[in-house]
Image: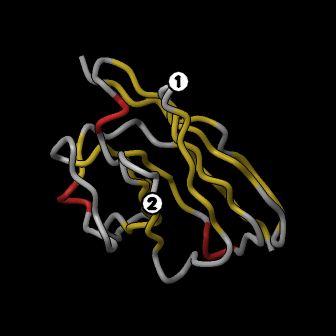
Amino acid sequence: QVQLVESGGGLVQAGGSLIISCNASGFDFSIYTMGWFRQTPGKEREFVASINWIQSAANYGDSVKGRFSISRDNAKNTVYLQMNSLKPEDTAVYFCGRYIKPFTAIREPRTANDFGSWGQGTQVTVSS
């Protein structure tokens, strides 16, 4: 079955960097746009970044533009999120999601409703 497993979260000081990963299985990873979202208690899941299935074009949420970078390795069925210049407000559980339709590229940030097959999430905590 479709499975997404996030890893790499942890505690980091403000200004630091962290890379988190999402390993996919149970489907043809190469034909799906993938996304990263984050969520804090009591708030909706927030779009962070997405990477298209073709040409790996990326989209970013306004709050992370210029600091975060998304990439994918189709040979490893893995999508990465490189997070630089981290701020305390980046503290959240980060989730990996698969776009609802294959062979579909997106050109702008989307809501969590456009993604599914969520992993269990990985906690990122940024201390001030």
Q: Amino acid at mark 2?
A: Ala
Q: Amino acid at mark 1?
A: Ala
Q: At 83% across and 72% down in the image, what residue appears? A: 15
Mark toward the start of the polypeptide (1 vs 2): 2
Helix, strand or loop at mark 2: loop
Question: Height in image: 37 above or below 72?
Answer: below
Write down the quadrant of residue 126 in the picture.
bottom right
Side (left or right) of 117 relative to 74: left
Write down the quadrant of residue 92 in the picture.
bottom right
Q: Split into 4 quadrants, where in the image is the N terminus?
A: top left
Q: At 59% across and 35% down in the image, what residue appears? A: 7
Side (left or right) of 121 relative to 98: right
Percent x, y of residue 52: 37, 53
* Residue at numbered disc 1: 75
Q: Which mark is residue 57?
A: 2
Helix, strand or loop at mark 1: loop
